[in-house]
Every structure is written in structure tokens, then in C-alpha cells.
Image: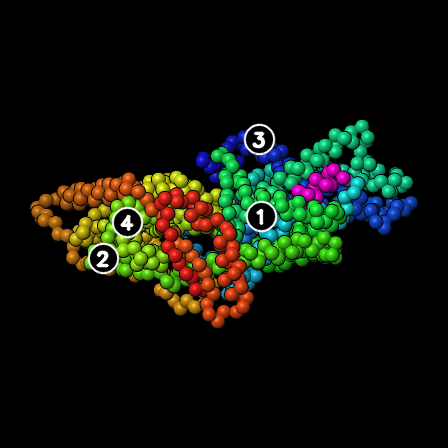
Amino acid sequence: MDLNYSKCWSASKKESWKNILLLAYQSLGVVYGDLSISPLYVFYSTFAEDIHHSETNEEIFGTLSFVFWTLTLVPLFKYVFIVLRADDNGEGGTFALYSLICRHAKVSLLPNRQVADEALSTYKMEHRPEKKSSSRAKLFLEEHKSLHTALLILVLVGTCMVIGDGVLTPAISVFSAVSGLELSMSKEHHQCSEVMFADLGHFSYDAIQIAFTFLVYPALILAYMGQAAYLSMHHDASSQISFYVSVPEIVRWPVLIIAILASVVGSQAIISGTFSIINQSQSLGCFPRVKVVHTSNKIHGQIYIPEINWLLMILCIAVTIGFRDIKHMGNASGLAVMAVMLVTTCLTSLVIILCWHKPPILALSFLLFFGSIELLYFSASLIKFREGAWLPILLALFLVTIMFVWHYATIKKYEYDLHNKVSLEWLLALGPSLGISRVPGIGIVFTNLTSGIPANFSRFVTNLPAFHRTLVFVCIKSVPVPYVPPAERYLMGRVGPPAHRSYRCIVRYGYRDVHQDVDSFESELVDKLANFIRYNWSQSPLNFDSVNEDGGSRSSEGRLAVIGMLASDFDLEESVRPESVSISFPTVNSVSDVIEMENVGVMDKRVRFAIDESKSDSESEFGATFAADALLQEELQELFEAQQAGTAFILGHSHVKAKQGSSILKRLAINYGYNFLRRNCRGADVALKVPPVSLLEVGMVYIV
């Protein structure tokens, strides 16, 4: 798949504007499909119960004024001119804001942050000097670990509310288009489904801004003004208030058809957005594993999740049958939308301080101004709790519980792996003297660790005293960026000296990336290994002070290289941030407890070359280079022979148990909740598409 990560305006100016206008046109259906049907129900819902016409038409023009200022302040001023600028490499949404905050402050609960990740081209950060006020806010946020958990829960709440809206929007949008007169919805609920910000990655800031400012916004205002003018002149038609009444009868059916089509497009947009959100949650370790299908070979980010699609269908039907009342569905959808807006306002306030380095007073003003408006809308929706607004709260509570339990258990498993990994010396000591043999082929050991030897491999060797001649420890890691370019995805290094034929491969994905099928992973991994071997020998040429008796250099697990278009290397001893590794684990006493920092123990005995002192230095270098080339060819030959012999995928089959003495809540969450989810979601082998004939599972019991 050929992915293009360049901006649409990187071409000529003429082509740039052409692309922007094309994207603006395409955004009309995807981004504004749901907002465009709001004129169908707003005036009817306002006057449907106890508000009647007066001779002065004050209530009509008051409602029009309310609608005008709502559309002006929230969608136009807040989103189009402010929030859309808080993008993460062109991506928008709740996770984009959280990703920005995690890159600028150490608040992530995932303890696998590396310096090498900051070299990614998509790891964009502000480089302006921080002000003292913003630094104080950053330090306060970083020092209070409870705020990290609170921030994650806030993000999960916003995410779950969007998913809940994905259940409600398909039903209510179609009903609003079809029934029109019967739709009852709180007048405050203008679903502007946060879609223009969440869909920012599918389009561009300029395209969405142009589409809303110059077409959607004036069209909506004109539609509301037209309805208000019609109602002000037809007082006797108070019982027939609807958008369709104000439409001339000759074009009423075409308008109805267009409204239905718009509702279908808007529903599809929120369903696709739900797929993206689930994929992002899964990438950040906040959701059980599900099957993600990439539906386009050309357009990045178009995905389909079969399990979620069926679940949304069942829930949508259940909501429709259960409520049987569009008014209740409207109350539920309105509360979900307003909750997401409030979460976005809070996160954007943090972005203003931490990422944009603006004065805290500016962020506080943004929070108070827009937060107070949205809080009024939210409270108005909350009043309707018994009339349908309870549904998104119940859905959010259920989903947040699932996501938080899964994330908590994932963190605890990572902590267990850190404390139970074995040293590099243990691996190097394995050999015939201990009854351990090395068999032909490639052994790919999947692990969550970015350094050290995982406990599941030691368990494997203990039960089966043999492992492959070529050993690769693979860590599939999520980094806080939307995309990782393929050329920067593989971070590779050696585990021990070259003669041991053991390697480490860290495969990095962003939260919007779709993980590559493992059907081609094996061959691509071998190609990357071959490139790394060539690069490693070119950067570490053979010299007399770095060669062992067995013909390998004294290389330890100390350097990693990005294998892609241009290779660059990083020191592993500096690649894992100690403060981020131990940030969530107060039991860690020191960095050495969790990171292997020791150099590999190697023999001091070195190969001695008989060199005639009369020969020139160039001849000595030529001989050393020739020897290095021979060792390079030997290592490459063994790699390809191992590939021909076959590949085995070694995965841990885990069972998690809470420690003795744990609280009842923790035991319920771990022993029953997490293990139930683990048994009923896709296994790691299925999610990674590991060939069953090549799978070796190692049983592991995690006591957390």
C-alpha cells in the first residue's frame, strides 16, 4: 500500500487550492451530514408543547436568535477557528488532543516511551521556549499521578460518548428525515456529533473551514430565518410546525428524499468514526483486540470492524424498539453530544497551556467561556434523564469500565514483565553445556518489552531446551502519534554479539495506523534484518580491539537503528526514559530494576592478526575490511538459510490473577472482568494473523 503522508498543499499553489476546494466539497456529506438535518426538528421541538404564538412574534424571533448565536459561538468560533487548530499532524478528535498532551507532558500511563520515538517525523512538538507559568502547570500535572488517571478517564468518557452517539445517530437521523413533524428534540441539541474535528484527518483544516464558513453556516442560518419568517406569518398553523410545512408543496417530495439521503450519509459518517475510535483505543491498549480490516489500498485510514458493526446494528435496533419514541432518542443523543463537547473544551484548554505555551489565563478564559455555554446545554439535557438521557450515561459507564479494566490489566502485565525479565547474560550462557541446542530456522518471540529478555522465552527454554539459530525479539509498540511512516516503522538492534544471531525489532505504529498483516510480516522482517546487518557492519567495521575469538564484534544490546530509507541509530541506554518507565509503578526502586543497562560479558581474549609492520596502514585497513565483508556475507547467508528452514512464532498465552490480599474490586476486575474479556476477544495470534502451523504458545500466569 502506497501511503502519502505529504500535505495536500505541498504541490503548486494552483493545485493546492484545487485540492482544498475538492476536499471542502467532499466534507459536506461526511462532516456536516448530521448537522444539515437540524432544521428539520429544531423549531418543531421548540413549539411542540407549551409555547404558543403571540402577536409580536417574540418567541419566534427569540428562538431564531438563540439558534443563530449557538451556531455562531460553538461550531464557528470554537471549532472552526480554535479547536481545529489543535490538530495532531492533521488528525483531530479526542485521542488527537490526548496524544498532543502526552507528547508535551509525561502523563501517559503506558511506560514504554523512548527517545528514539521523538525522532519520528510525525512526532511534531512546539520548540518555542516555555514560559514559567506553563512550566509550572506542566510540572504540577506531571507530579500528581492521580491526575494522569483522571485525564485518561476523561478521554475515555469522551470516547465512549462518541461511540454511544454512533448507536443513537443512525436511528434518530433517519427518523428525523422521514417523520419530520413527529420528531421531538431538545432545542439546545445542535449536533455539530464533534464530527468536524474528529474527521479532520480525512480532510484538511482549510477544507473544513471553507466548507463551514462559506456554505454550511450561511445555508443553515438562511434555513432557520426562512422558517422563522414563515411561522411569523402563519399563526394559525401552530399545530403544523415543521420544516416541511415551510417548503413549497411542489418540491416537498424532492426535499424529503434529499433529507433521507443526507441522514444516511450522516449515519455512515458516525459509524465510520466509531470504527476509527475503536481502532485508536485498541492501539493505546484501552480496548480488547478486534479484527480491523483495511478497506482501501490507496486511501489510508478507511477501515471496517465486523464485530463492532454487528454490535452497533443490534444496539441500534434495541434502542429503536425499546424507546419507540423519537423524543427520548433525541434527549439521549443530545446529552452524548454535549458531553463530548465538554471533554473537548477541557482537553483543548490543556493544549493551549502545554502545547501552544499560551498564558494560563487565556486557557482559563477559553474554558470558562465555552465551558459555561456547553455546561448549560449539558444540564438542560441532564434534566431529561428519565426521558431517555439515561441511555448514553449507561452506555458510557459500561464502555468506560471495559476500557479502563483492559488498560489497567495491560499496564499491570507490562509491570510484571519488567520485573520478571531475565538478563542478557542468561541468554548468552545458554548452550550445549546446559543441554540447550539451537535448531535451524527463525524464532520470532513476541514481547511487550523494548529491552531485556521476556519471561515467556525463559519459560519456553525451560520446558523445551532448544531454540532457533536465528532469534528475533519483536515488540509491537504504539507511539503517541497518529501515523508512523513505513520508512520509520522498524527500530532494530542486536541482542548480544553478532555470532549469537539474536536481534531485537521494535515495530512502531501510531494510533490511526492499521497494523500490517503478518502474512507479509515474516518476509519484510527478514528484509529489514538483512538491511540492518549491512548497516551495522558498515557502521562498526572490523577492528582489532572489537573482535572476539568467535569472530563477532563486542556488540551488546546498546544501539538501535531505524531501518528504512535512511538508517540512523540510537543508544538503547538512553532510549527509554527512566521517569516514564517508573511513572506508574511506585514499587520500582531504581532504573536498573527495570532496564538492562549492563554491558554484555564477553571474553577478553581477542583475535590476533599477524601483520607485517612494514606494510602500510592502507593495506591493514584493506585486510580488516575484507575480513568484515566475509563475516557480513556469512551472517547474511545464515539468515536466508534460516528463513528457508522455516519460521516459528512464539507467543505468550497469559492468564492474569490478582495478588492475594487484593481488594474485592480489584479481584473482580482482574480475575473475572479482564479474563472474561480476554477469553472472548480475538487472541494475539488471530489479531496478528500468525499461521497456526507456525504458532508456539507459552503458558504464562501473571500475578498482578
Q: Nearer the viewer, residue 471 or 631?
A: 471
Tell me the mark number nearer the camera, choosing from 4 and 1.
4
Observer-side mark, 2 or 1, equals: 2
Q: Which residue is mark 4?
A: 468
Q: Tell me the amino acid under the disc marked 4.
A: His
Q: CA distance from mark 1 to mark 3?
A: 26 Å
Residues rendered magenta in the picture: 168-179
Nearest to N terminus: mark 2 or mark 3: 3
Viewer-closest of 659 and 19: 659
Check the picture and name the quadrant holding the N terminus.
Answer: top left
The disc, 4 or 1, on the residue closer to the chain's N-terminal end is 1
Residue under the image location 78 percent in, 29 percent down:
251
Mark 3 highlights which residue? 18
Q: Residue 586 at x, y = what percent?
A: 45, 67
Q: Which residue is mark 2?
A: 435
Which is closer to the viewer, label 3 or label 4?
Answer: 4
For marks 2 and 1 on the same chain, the one whose residue lies earlier in the sequence: 1
Q: Position of residue 184 (x, y in %)?
A: 77, 46
Q: CA distance from mark 2 to mark 4?
A: 14 Å
Does dot 3 land on a helix, a strand or a loop?
helix
As helix, strand or loop, the secondary structure at mark 2 comes to: loop
* Residue 250 visible here: yes
